[in-house]
């Protein structure tokens, strides 16, 4: 099977998953994770970018969470400029 490099958005989605996993490891599941916490984990993440990565590459996020024993329970967009919130539970 040939090597297929990841696109920039796939790489950013993997970074988003890593930040969410770090927060869940630190705080325990279940946990609600808002955009402010995500920006602390990676200052380059904007609310718009987080939402786009989630909608486009939800499968990458869910797979990474499942590998660590977590599951995405809920995702809610709080509206323009307010960001989103992820609800993470035990897998």
Image (cartoon, rainbow, N blue to C red):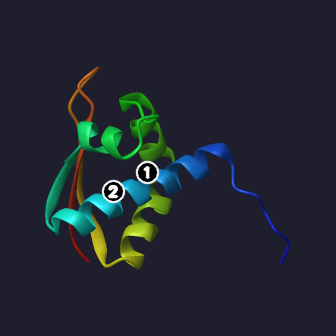
Local crowd size for mark 2, using a 10 Å CA cut-off: few (<14), some (14–19), many (≥20): many
Residue highlighted by disc 2: 20
Q: Quick check: 79 left or right of 44?
A: left
Quarter of the figure with residue 71: bottom left
Reply above or below: 31 against 82: below
Q: Quick check: 14 left or right of 69?
A: right
Nearest the viewer among 25 and 86 is 25
- Point 43% across, 59% down: residue: 18
Q: Are marks 2 and 1 in contact (CB under 8 Å)?
A: yes
Looking at the figure, which quarter contains the N terminus?
bottom right
Looking at the figure, which quarter contains the C terminus?
bottom left
Element on which disc 1 rests: helix
- Point 50% across, 51% down: residue: 13
Q: Can you give x and y, in whole percent of width and height, for residue 59 in the image?
A: 47, 61
Quarter of the figure with residue 74: bottom left
Q: Can you give x and y, in whole percent of width and height, for residue 65 in the image?
A: 37, 69
Nearest the viewer among 49 and 43 is 43
Reply above or below: 31 against 53: below
Q: Residue 42 carries which label?
A: none
Residue at far top of view: 81
Local crowd size for mark 1, using a 10 Å CA cut-off: few (<14), some (14–19), many (≥20): many
Residue highlighted by disc 1: 16
Element on which disc 2 rests: helix
**Distance between the Cα atoms at labels 2 and 1?**
6 Å
Nearest the viewer among 30 and 52 is 30
Nearest the viewer among 83 and 76 is 83
Quarter of the figure with residue 50: top left
């Amino acid at each position: 099977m040939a090597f297929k490099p990841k696109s920039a958005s796939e790489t950013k989605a993997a970074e988003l998953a890593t930040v969410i996993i770090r927060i869940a490891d630190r705080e325990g599941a279940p946990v609600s994770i808002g955009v402010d916490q995500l920006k602390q984990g990676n200052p380059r993440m904007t609310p718009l970018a987080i939402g786009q990565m989630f909608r486009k590459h939800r499968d990458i996020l869910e797979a990474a969470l499942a590998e660590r024993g977590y599951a995405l329970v809920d995702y809610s967009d709080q509206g323009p400029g307010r960001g989103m919130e992820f609800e993470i539970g035990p897998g």
